[in-house]
Amino acid sequence: MTLLSPTVEETVTATTHAGARDLLARPSLRDTVSQSLVMAWRSTKKMRRNPEQFFDVTIQPLLFTAMFAYIFGGAISGSVRDYLPIIIPGILAQTALTACMATGIQLREDMDKGVFDRFKSLPIARIAPLAGPAIADLLRYGTAATLTILTGLAMGYRPGGGFFGILGGWLLTIVAGWSLAWIFTWLGTIARSAQAVQGISMMIMFPLTFLSNAFVPAETLPAWLEAFVNVNPVSHVVTAVRDLLNTGQVTAQVGWALFGCAIVVAVFAPLAVRSYSRKM
Amino acid sequence: MNTNHSPVSSALAVRAAGLVKTFGPLRAVDGIDLEVRRGEVFGVLGPNGAGKTTMLQMLATLLPMDGGSADIFGVDVKQHPHVVRQLVGVTGQYASVDENLTARENLYLFGRLLGVDKRKSRRTAEELLGRFGLEDAGDKQISQFSGGMRRRLDLAASLIARPPLIFLDEPTTGLDPRTRGQMWDTIRDLVAQGCTVLLTTQYLDEADQLAHRIAVIDRGRKVAEGTPDQLKNQVGSSTLQLRLLDPAQTPAAVDVVRRVIGDEPVLTPEAGGINVPLPDANRAADVLIGLRQQELLITSATVQKPTLDEVFMTLTGHRADEPSDADQTPMEMSR
């Protein structure tokens, strides 16, 4: 199954009762994009009817930001205010990860429904039913990132990067959430149930967020742990967001974070489409 | 840039040869050949778990085939799945519409997915809602729909692309008789407009009413094929169900039937029950007179059209509801 269409569109003509029809041998890139957007429209309709889908991206940023800042602030940075430049980017990465975990779980639930049988029977790109929810979930990542930053500002966080630094950090968080969501989308297509996706996702998410520099400076950790933390992709995203928010500079870390995101999409999007096409 | 393949034309809408699907040790579809002509309704008749749905899913590119080959209007299913999907509309055993959307939104969604522009998608949705008597329910969420309404919406959704071939997987299972009649009318309309229909059913009556030709499937194999009349001639057009007062007289009654009808009756599991296949319903009187002359007393006698059970008894030697090793395919169990 091809993920993206080749440049040459082949057509097959079959003579049916309606006369000869020109039939595409595979969906074109344009069709693939427009079908994915229609699927995204479907997801937003779903979101509007089930607003509880936004609980994790509204309550969690508020709660975690306040909780972590007040509990760890004094111990790690001497004061809550000094801790905010460290913790806000950390919480941004963490909420993005939790939000994209939900992408996989919801996809799994969705796939058990009859309508996915119809999606499979339609002449549409195989990636569209997967890409649609991923695009719609940009709304969720955006909500999570906005609320986290606003909570930080309300608590006295004054990012040194200014408006464009904040905008950059906000965008990077959303891009990272969207890219990492493909891992969980893939899990959604291979797992047997939504509960299984949740279980596996938790096992991935906790080590990735807590064994990173999201909450504590990596230098305070034992050497072996520091080594892991330094290669953890989440650490790169956190550092990159910190650079953007606190200094407004597009550092090499930003490049590495984006590069990591691109690799994740390049690996997991085709895997997800392949296992989805084989399922059922 | 369009590079046209050589135009494919085929007198057949569906041609399948040696279709095989296995689920572990179970051969759900075990070498089925099928030829569906253009413009006809072809019925696939069989009990639960016979492999009907599995076969349809392979032809509709929903399941990979483990053996054999198939083409739709001359287009190979394995090599050009995307082309086949443009030619076939699939309506499943279970309504496959989106529960989170309203009826109108569902039809709009499928129109848009098929590349129809926004305005035309909205218009097509309205037309189809009207045609299927769902105008008033257009803004209701599907979760509030009755089974019959869902089934109609499901069929409506399959028609958006105006596919020349439609697969209907047990379109009336679980529907009340009135809704079933409406569904039959809709299917006849489709055929009148030139559609080819491949439908599966558990009801002989339904296949008889709708299909030009019927294949009977049992345990993944085709056991018979022909027009409804040919099939009914094989099983008799109707059945005389007798119940003897004294079960001990059964052998004597069987002798009478043999002499009068010239055919072997079927003994039912209840003591004293005899089912007599009749070439003509009027011959029932001859059997009853024969029994009377021999002073064999009955408690009841009814003349019935043959049921799927009897077709099966005759064609396969076992009852349709008898659990077989191919009782259910994993697909059906997982629902």
Image (cartoon, rainbow, N blue to C red):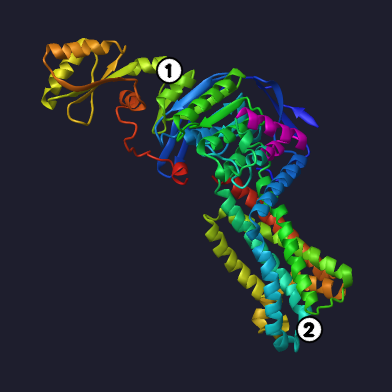
* Magenta highlight on residue B326: no
> Which residue is label 2 attached to?
A81
Q: Give the residue displayed 62% in from the left and 36% down from the top.
A: B136
In front of the other: B329 or B206? B206
Q: Main secondary structure of the magenta part?
A: helix
* Magenta highlight on residue B117: yes
User: Mark 2 belongs to which subunit?
Assistant: A
Spot occupied by residue A272 in the image (x, y as percentages of width and height): 63, 52
Place residue B153 in its image quadrant.
Answer: top right
Q: Give the residue displayed 61% in from the left and 32% down from the top.
A: B156
Does residue B245 appear to the left or right of A251 in the view shown?
left
Which of the two discs, 2 and 1, sits closer to the camera? 2
Q: Give the residue displayed 66% in from the left and 72% down from the top.
A: A209
Place residue B165 in its image quadrant.
Answer: top right
The kind of residue tagged 2 is Arg
Q: Give the residue displayed 79% in from the left and 78% down from the top.
A: A85
* Vertical arrangement, residue A253 with respect to residue B195, above or below: below
Q: Is residue B11 visible?
A: no
Place residue B192 in its image quadrant.
Answer: top right
Q: Residue furthest front?
A: B136
User: Helix, strand or loop at disc 1?
Assistant: helix
Q: Residues within 10 Å of mark 2 (few under 14, many from 20)?
A: some
Query: Which region shows up in magenta?
Result: B108-132
> Which residue is label 1 attached to?
B228
Distance of label 2 from label 1 (alpha carbons) = 84 Å
Spot occupied by residue B38 in the image (x, y as percentages of width and height): 58, 19
User: Helix, strand or loop at disc 2?
Assistant: helix
The kind of residue tagged 1 is Pro
Disc 2 and disc 1 in contact, CB within 8 angstroms: no
